[in-house]
Amino acid sequence: MRILFSLLFVTFLSTSSLAGENITYSVDGQPYQGYLVKTKPDAPMILLVHDWDGLTDYEVKRAQMLADLGYSVFAADLFGAGVRPTKLEDKKQHTGELYKDRQKLRKLLYGALDAAKAQGLNTGNAIAAGYCFGGAAVLEMARSGADLKGFVAFHGGLVTPEGQNYSTAKGKFLILHGSADTAVTLDQFAALAKELEENHVEHEMITYSGAPHAFTVFGAPSYREDADKKSWKRFTEYLSETL
């Protein structure tokens, strides 16, 4: 079943009518390379944030899927042009540096948003969505008070750093999480729900039984087709409701 789904997914991508392009932009004088898929001039926009291996074919595939639904997408690069770590220690290093320097992380997220605006995307009608590390980054952006219509995390890091909170958060939140995730626990999931409620942040949080961390990553041992399809369906519904 998983092989059949993958073949169907590849066929879907090959018939996509919208071509994306790599976009080089700078933040604090350093080069970064994002990925842009532009649909209609005023189409709602999604800022897509990558996992801990950087902006790869996975985010490109998701960007194309969203573009085929009518959304313009800018996939951010938080590591730097050409930095796409493959070794575990390198992935930990790059994400760890940004977790330790939250101001830099925020600056990179806003820099990507500025790059999207410079390319003519409609940042006034936009949400941010991310996977794993990208989900944690999206929540960081939300805590900064970013003026977006929503924030979505797929199996993302959910712990709020010491000294931060959601008192200035805007928009509607959608948190999609695997109940079998041992990297980000259900206790952390519940703690986030409590914190969002206490700060009167509009939110919806869903768990998927048997789904481990990274349950949406095609071809990975962690991939769970049922949870991936259900979470993607709810995501697309959320986009229609929010943008």
Image (cartoon, rainbow, N blue to C red):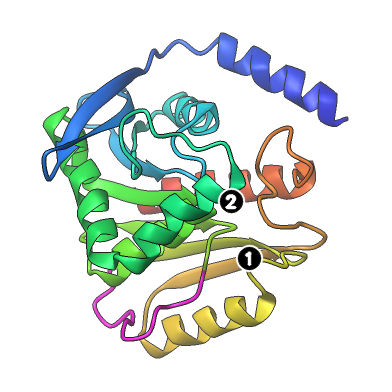
Q: Position of residue 63 (x, y in %)?
A: 45, 30
Q: Is residue 159 magenta?
A: yes
Question: Where does label 1 land, which residue?
Answer: 206
Identify the disc placed on residue 234.
2
**Residue at x 57% of width, y 16% of height:** 13
Q: Is residue 90 left or right of residue 218?
A: left
Among the two numbered marks 1 and 2 on one chain, the one whose residue lies closer to the N terminus: 1
Q: Is residue 38 left or right of residue 137?
A: left
Q: Amino acid at mark 2?
A: Arg
**Which residue, as the protein is rendered here, is positioned at the far front?**
89
User: Residue 107 occupies which quadrant of the picture?
Assistant: bottom left
Quadrant position of the N terminus in the picture: top right
Q: Position of residue 150 (x, y in %)?
A: 35, 58
Q: Amino acid at mark 1?
A: Ile
- Magenta range: 158-171
**Residue at x 56% of width, y 9% of height:** 15
